[in-house]
Image: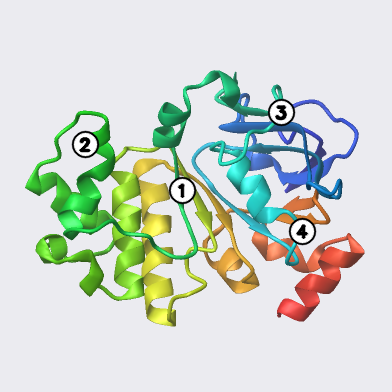
Amino acid sequence: MLRRNGSCAGSPSEGAVEQPAEFGAPRPKFRIKGLTKLSESGETILAGVNMDIPRGIIVGIIGPSGSGKSTLLRALNRLWEPPAGTVFLDGDDILDIDVLALRRKVGMLFQLPALFEGTVAENVRYGPALAGRKVSDAEVARLLGLADLDPSLASRNGSELSVGQAQRVALARTLANDPEVLLLDEPTSALDPISTQNIEDAIVRLKKTRGLTVVLVSHSLKQIQRVADVACLVVDGEVVEMMEPSDMARAHHPMARRFLELST
């Protein structure tokens, strides 16, 4: 069942988008209010985005190339600085949160994994070490298991891994910071189908077992349908529809509908 609700959890407002009612919450994990970004040449990248991201679910963001998906995602952990009063985490303006503390709470996985020199275990321990926290061998093994990796890989050098393995080590490294939110920017676009399935299985399992809030940017309609609880359609810097993935064929926006038709 869907409801029309501009804030996706509050009272109706201008520019409303559809949100599954059962995923609403009194206070969402993220609230985005009038988020706008212009390019250096003055072109609109994000056009006053308003949306809520409920806690504990997977939100899939999909849309044509250049529509602002990754820019929207990167605002959530201040990889670019959004204007004050536009992005809120648990009710707090993210500009009021120390940026390192924010990025421990809101971890991010990119399209291509970037491992540091050294062993897999050293990579997994990197974030906690910056915060002065030691991670035991047993904890490294547990984190690798969460990322669907064999703990025996801990002593391997990162340069010896396949791209799929490296991506899952990057996921384990992110999980070592004990994040509350996981941002995924096309995390499987460079992977083969088996590695893609491994990453997707790990993401869904983390949502179920740890209650992680996950925001996934993808060009793959099928991937969004496989793993997401809510699909967010972005066109020309605007969130034009929010709906259950199984309902995406019913999208109303002409460009969103055309994109989805060509994606099937």
In which quadrant of the rendered view does residue 101 lie?
top left
Label 3, label 2: how many angstroms apart (C-alpha)? Answer: 31 Å
Q: Position of residue 253 (x, y in %)?
A: 89, 60
> Mark 3: which amino acid?
Pro
Label 3, label 1: how many angstroms apart (C-alpha)? Answer: 21 Å
Q: Residue at x 42, y 48 (%)?
A: 207
- Looking at the rendered structure, the secondary structure element under dot 3 is loop
Q: Which mark is residue 144?
A: none
In terms of sequence position, does the residue under pointer 3 or pointer 2 come before the other? Answer: 3
Q: Does 116 sit above or below residue 34?
A: below
The residue where tag 4 is placed is 67
In terms of sequence position, does the residue under pointer 2 or pointer 1 come before the other? Answer: 1
In terms of sequence position, does the residue under pointer 4 or pointer 2 come before the other? Answer: 4
> Mark 4: which amino acid?
Ser
- Please state which of residues 9 and 88 is positioned toward the viewer in this rendering: 88
- Looking at the rendered structure, the secondary structure element under dot 4 is loop
The residue where tag 3 is placed is 83
> Mark 2: which amino acid?
Ala
Q: Which mark is residue 129?
A: 2
In terms of sequence position, does the residue under pointer 1 or pointer 4 come before the other? Answer: 4
